[in-house]
Amino acid sequence: MNVIQVSNLSKDFGEVKAVDQVNFFVKTDEIFGFLGPNGAGKTTTIRMMTGVLRPTSGTIQIYGKEVWKNQIMIKQILGNVPEEANVYMDLTGFQNLNFIGELYSIPKEIRKERAFNLLRQFELYERRNSLAKKYSKGMKQRLLLCMALMSEPKILFLDEPTSGLDVQSSIIIKNLIKEYNKNGMTVFLTTHNMDVANEMCDRIAIINKGKIIKCDTPDNLRTVEREYQAINLYLSKEINPSIFTNVQGIKSFSKVKDYYHAIVSDIDQAISGIIKITTEHNIKIHKINTPEPSLEEVFINAIKEGETKNLE
Amino acid sequence: MIQIKRSFAISKKDLRIYYNKGPVVIQGILFPIMLFLAFTIGREILPIYIISGLMTMVLFLTSTSIGPVVFPWETRQKTLERLITCPISIRTILLGNVWSSFLFGCIFSTVPLILGIIFLGLWKEMNLLILVPGILLAAFSFSSFSLILSVPPTDTPASTMILTILIKFPLIFVSPLFMPISLNPITFISPLSYFLDILNVGLGSPSAFGSLGLFFDFGYLIIFGFVFLFLAFILHAKVLQKRFKG
Ligand SMILES: Nc1ncnc2c1ncn2[C@@H]1O[C@H](COP(=O)(O)OP(=O)(O)O)[C@@H](O)[C@H]1O
Ligand SMILES: [Mg+2]
């Protein structure tokens, strides 16, 4: 069953189309990720899904109910950690949780028990009575997660949950999200980090400039990634890049500063072809390296098949 | 109903956060003392007018002290988005703000009353059945009024504070504090006059607005409070989306 169904969703800010005709769905019990560079429209999408922003057009249904029209009811079953959100600095860790519990009308005894359990899980229990302003960034982010989990939500929204965190907090958070998910919670998260998406998500939607470019499992996306690799070549002589573009297996070839950058679909064919040409022209290869192709390279190149792109 | 309970939780949070913050302390203690001295030095004033004037000033200043800063403060601290994804509406948040301002107002304004009772012997003619409802109503009305002042979608508490001061101080200066209420047009406009009148009556002097004066006072404050409360509901709902910038 689809917990979330998003259809033709758009959000304009004046001239800017922050989100542009987006369609996707999220299934029960999965971790679904939005992966994309800064300004792609991730935060705007999540804000519309959590009832913070009103869509310009299109619909978001959660359990079959339109979000904007059933805000209170839907918010009751959501947990949310907004991007760069903050806890109340002048309240203690426990008071922050207790406050959220009250807003969900959780009875006092249960509130306390849940808050303590969460604080233990997220390794904040010892510090439960210190003011949150004394917490480190990672501790605050963990407390925010506890706040989102206070109501035992059916769906958890996380906007860049681990960006800018220390390793320890990041690991605690990632592991616990996975654990909660195993116990039946649907998770929607955004990230600009490919590794986080690969590690956490059951399915990933790649978003850029407000549009979803691709949506699939990490495994399937990785095969796409394998199809496209990048090579940097340092050569002994200047050469016209266009003589490489007809080589089998090379998608694009261009000069960047003091080296040449190629996007290849078949590394084996491409390298044999390159060696053949450099030998013919009596050029020596000084250095060759294979940088990880960036998101933009892999996926945007995949979209713009055939178009030769200047990559700097 | 459940939303009203939740608004109490918000109010408790507001009280915890703001009770020791600048605006409340300055407006509840410092300003009244300074203004009191400015108004009264070198003048002969009846004890009733000292106390009703002080109470009006303190209640008005404190009950309008946190309303204007809550939204900019929460926007700046980045707690607002978290808060509104809880199952509450903007009205719940605003009501929560009203309760906490209301409490500040009630608590601070009883201080001059107690001083008056102890040092000026005002208990003799005092009528608590008028004073208590009057204080409660005025605290509610002024709190609701203050919500309007935080409508501009800024994340700088100082800018709504300035707006607040530009509106609040003239209101205080045109009100007939520390003197008998005279019936000129400005008196009728300022909501403070009606609260002053209630206090004067409650402390044993006749209403400036005639024999039905008290009804007039209470009626005005009730309407004033609810008009601003609903206005705040509408305007804040409109402006809320503008508080979330990329
Ligand atoms: N409140 C806003 N007003 C105007 N433009 C906005 C607003 N919020 C976001 N944007 C713009 O919309 C685009 C998408 O932003 P955002 O959703 O924050 O991207 P992401 O979270 O993927 O980095 C950006 O170009 C951003 O500048
Ligand atoms: Mg973002």
Image (spheres, coloured by chain):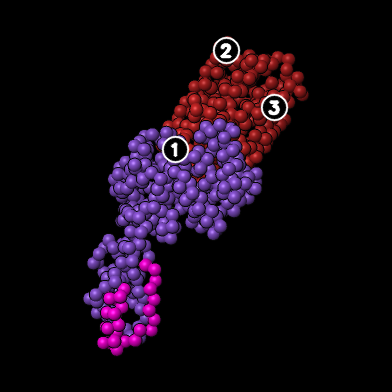
Chain colours: A purple, B red
Which of the chains bears the disc numbered 3?
B
List the residue tagged with mark 2: B210
Give the image location of residue B135, x and y in percent.
61, 23
Q: Residue at x 37, y 41 (%)?
A: A3
Q: Residue at x 62, y 43 (%)?
A: A92
Asked if ligand 1 lies within 8 A of label 3, the reply is: no
Give the image location of residue A101, x and y in percent.
54, 36
> Pointer 2: residues within 10 angstroms few (<14), some, or many (20+)?
few
- Amino acid found under the numbered disc labelled 1: Ile
Residue A77, label in figure: 1
> Pointer 1: residues within 10 angstroms few (<14), some, or many (20+)?
some
Q: Residue at x 41, y 45 (%)?
A: A29
Q: Residue at x 41, y 40 (%)?
A: A51
> Pointer 3: residues within 10 angstroms few (<14), some, or many (20+)?
some
Calculate the distance from the C-alpha at mark 2 to the C-alpha at mark 1.
57 Å
Q: Is residue B201 above or below residue B32?
A: above
Image quarter of the C terminus of chain A = bottom left
Front residue of B223/B190: it is: B223
Image quarter of the N terminus of chain A = top left
- Determine whether, in the image, residue A8 is placed left or right of residue B13: left
Bounds of the magenta segment = A267-293
Give the image location of residue B183, x and y in percent.
56, 19
The secondary structure type at the circle numbered 2 is loop
